Image: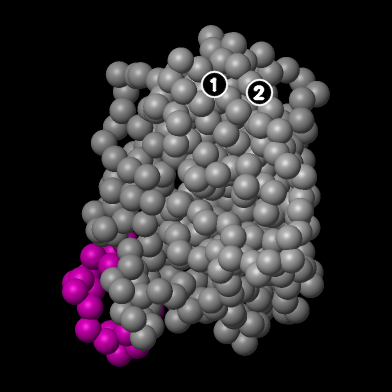
């Protein structure tokens, strides 16, 4: 593997009108989590969530400071990275935040231009454009900082034919439990501090060219005790959606405040992954030990009155704890896992869209009451 600098031109302003989408993004390339034990984490995501062995980088491939296991399921790729020595930046990240998302990598056609366009609009540089090479070609990468210690890495892979990225080898194992039907990343939610939501909404709008598509205030997302506010940002083609949450005043500590306390700052709260059959997917996940938040059984007593006719039978939805909501375009089905680590921070959402473009506003009250019950058990409400 060799690395060479791409020598990008410095930020320039031409005075010409900006393109309607100056940052075209093809989709989510991968999500990198910094974890205390990447090997064990990979085993967990394979066993519990049905991910498959995909790629590996570490001492055997020439890396001296870290080890990364990549697991995949359809279009979803998770990179699980751990440090190999004390006092590393990765180790400091884990010590501060616990296991969590460090990199949200975005697949682009031109990583150098993506860097230039965002940096000239005010993004703080994380990685200047550079090229990784091996016998399978080359990939160009660059990156910018976003909220907290989270970063976006732009990945250009049109000239790479290898398994994942230069420096990785195919990870082949005899143990690969069946997938559970997860397809792609639907959206990723970020939690930010008090009065910081609009700062990051403006960042995604002005620096990355995203548009705000939905807004929720504390009247929409509240219970008798807690509240939060949220705005959803989407890129030009709609393939990337980033809801941004901030706390709102309530009688008790909200889920966002709990997250900020235990993550020690802003970060990715949950990853929503799509399925074409949520009943089959959740059944498989529960059989493998994945734990989900549960709403009271009374939620289903008036469900069809609220959302109208749906294709699914009510009985399995109630048995599994799957929530349903409708908008003008159709309906969606969704369910949320409990936190996947020791700290009450990162969790996953499983979602199936039957035409709906929204995010389950009608379920917020029931969902947040379920989260409050979990907080009460943890003594953090």
Residue 234 vs residue 99, the one in the foreground: 234
Q: Magenta stretch?
A: 298-321
Point 45% across, 81% down: residue: 362
Magenta region includes residue 304: yes
Residue 338 sits above or below residue 179 on the image: below
Give the SS element for disc 1.
strand
Point 58% across, 75% down: residue: 212
Q: Where is residue 290 in the image (x, y as percent from the top left)?
A: 41, 47
Q: Is residue 333 left or right of residue 201?
A: left
Residue 61 visible? yes
Q: How crowded is mark 1: few (under 14 residues within 10 Å), some or many (20 or more)?
A: some
Give the SS element for disc 2.
strand
Q: How far apart are marks 1 and 2 (CA)?
A: 8 Å
Point 67% across, 47% down: residue: 115
**Disc ID at residue 4:** 2
Q: Would you say the residues marked 1 and 2 are in contact, meaning their CB atoms lie under 8 Å apart?
A: yes
Residue 253 visible? no
Magenta region includes residue 296: no
Residue 253 sits above or below residue 156 on the image: below
Point 25% across, 58% down: residue: 277
Q: Where is residue 309 in the image (x, y as percent from the top left)?
A: 22, 84
Tell which residue pokes out farthest to the bottom in this image.
305
**Disc ID at residue 7:** none
């Amino acid at each position: 593997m060799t690395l060479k600098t791409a020598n990008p031109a410095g930020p320039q302003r031409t005075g010409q009108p900006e393109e309607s989408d100056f940052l075209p993004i093809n989709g989510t390339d991968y999500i990198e989590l910094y974890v205390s034990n990447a090997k064990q984490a990979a085993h967990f995501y394979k066993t519990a969530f049905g991910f498959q062995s995909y790629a590996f980088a570490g001492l055997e491939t020439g890396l001296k400071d870290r080890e990364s296991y990549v697991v995949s399921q359809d279009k979803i790729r998770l990179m699980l990275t751990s440090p190999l020595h004390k006092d590393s930046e990765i180790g400091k990240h884990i010590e501060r935040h616990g296991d969590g998302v460090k990199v949200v990598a975005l697949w682009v056609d031109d990583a150098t231009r993506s860097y230039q366009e965002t940096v000239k609009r005010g993004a703080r540089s994380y990685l200047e454009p550079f090229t990784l090479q091996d016998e399978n070609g080359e990939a160009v990468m660059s990156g910018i900082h976003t909220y907290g210690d989270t970063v976006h890495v732009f990945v250009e892979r049109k000239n790479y034919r290898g398994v994942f990225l230069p420096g990785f080898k195919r990870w082949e194992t005899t143990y690969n439990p069946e997938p559970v039907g997860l397809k792609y990343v639907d959206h990723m939610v970020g939690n930010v501090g008090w009065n910081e939501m609009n700062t990051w909404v403006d960042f995604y709008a002005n620096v990355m060219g995203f548009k705000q598509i939905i807004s929720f205030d504390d009247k929409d997302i509240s219970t008798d005790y807690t509240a939060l506010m949220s705005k959803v940002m989407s890129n030009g083609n709609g393939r990337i959606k980033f809801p941004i949450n901030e706390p709102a005043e309530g009688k008790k500590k909200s889920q966002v405040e709990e997250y900020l306390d235990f993550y020690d700052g802003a970060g990715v709260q949950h990853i929503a992954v799509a399925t074409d059959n949520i009943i089959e997917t959740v059944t498989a996940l529960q059989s493998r030990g994945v734990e989900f938040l549960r709403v009271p059984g009374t939620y289903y007593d008036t469900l069809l009155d609220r959302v109208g006719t749906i294709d699914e039978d009510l009985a399995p939805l109630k048995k599994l704890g799957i929530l349903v909501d409708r908008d003008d375009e159709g309906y969606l089905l969704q369910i949320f896992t409990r936190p996947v680590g020791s700290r009450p921070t990162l969790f996953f959402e499983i979602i199936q869209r039957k035409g709906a473009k929204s995010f389950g506003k009608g379920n917020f009250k029931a969902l947040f009451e379920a989260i409050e019950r979990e907080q009460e058990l943890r003594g953090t409400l």
